[in-house]
Image: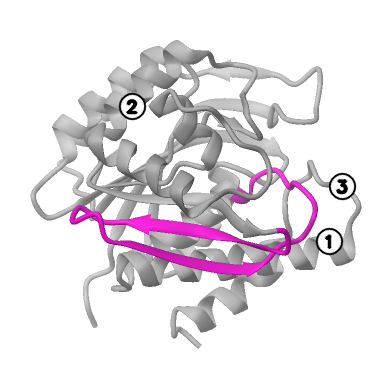
Amino acid sequence: MDKQKRLVAINDVSGFGRCSLTVASPIISASGIECVCMPTAVLSTHTGGFSGYTYRDLTNDMPLITRHWKSIDLKFDAIYSGFLGSIEQIDIVKDFIKNFKTDDNILIADPCMADLGKMYILFDENFAKKMTSLCALADIILPNITEACFMTDTEYIDGVQTKEYIEMLLNKLIDSGAKNVILTGVSFEDDKIGAACMNSERHVQYYFNEKIPENYHGTGDVFASSFCGALLNGFSLYESMCVAVRFTCDCIKRTKESSPETHYGVDFERGIPFLLKELGKI
């Protein structure tokens, strides 16, 4: 049997709301990948649609975790960064990359900071500029349309987009230093949604699925986690994107049929068998 691959997920822990590490860890683990977790913050709930949530910043803990892991000579097949709780954490993650990035492993960055044309409540445009410098180090970045706009100083267009607009964003992201880009939330028709992939040779590919007319929190984490799972199982960049689109849409559709709460996250747990079939595990 082949040696099991190991990924470190740098992300927050939101106790309720199905996002970040409470999504990443089970999805990546179910994909057969060991998921090591570096928490960036601990929240009682995520910040979208809830008020009065608790927030514990772990900025000071992250260098200590890095130092300990280095001392025990941990090695990773992939580094996946998601929600970072402060602008200072971006430099901490850069230092983590210096310590653990090799010629053989993959750095995947999800610039988790904005959606639907707005920055998340904790962040501002300075954070977006700083995040661009982290994404420039990555092998693959996974922004949504809003994040891509903030990172490239481009006007956000709500609703359906044009192919020219999407490929302008993709090219700007490659120009900013990203090697490969997966852009999520792409829609050329009212009833279809998916993603666009541009590789380092600037070759573009698209994949779409059925669009459910609701906005569910945590779907970016579901997409990123299933993408990582597919990629580390040997799927190509484009194939991994397709797996992630199908799995995310499956989770949204199931949730739409069973729950009216869009800010509680999506029912990914009962979709794990769907993902395992996609990955050829069952």
Say whether disc 3 or disc 2 marks the residue closer to the N-terminus: 2
Where residue 165 appears, x then y in whole percent? 47, 44
Q: How many marks?
A: 3
Position above or below: 134 against 79: above
Where residue 94 appears, x then y in whole percent? 24, 26
Position of 208 compared to 76: left or right? Answer: right
Q: Quadrant of the N terminus?
A: bottom left
Say whether disc 3 or disc 1 marks the residue closer to the N-terminus: 1
- Where residue 174 sits, quadrant-wise, is top left
Q: Which residue is mark 3?
A: 261
Which residue is drawn at the image coordinates 68% and 32% (left, top)?
46
How far is the residue under mark 2 from the one under mark 1? 34 Å
Structural crowding at the residue carrying mark 3, measured as other residues with C-alpha within 10 Å and reported as few (<14), some (14–19) or many (≥20): few
Q: Which residue is mark 1?
A: 256
Q: Which residues are magenta?
A: 190-219
Question: Does 218 lie within the magenta span?
Answer: yes
Q: Which residue is mark 2?
A: 132
Residue 28 can be seen, yes or no: no
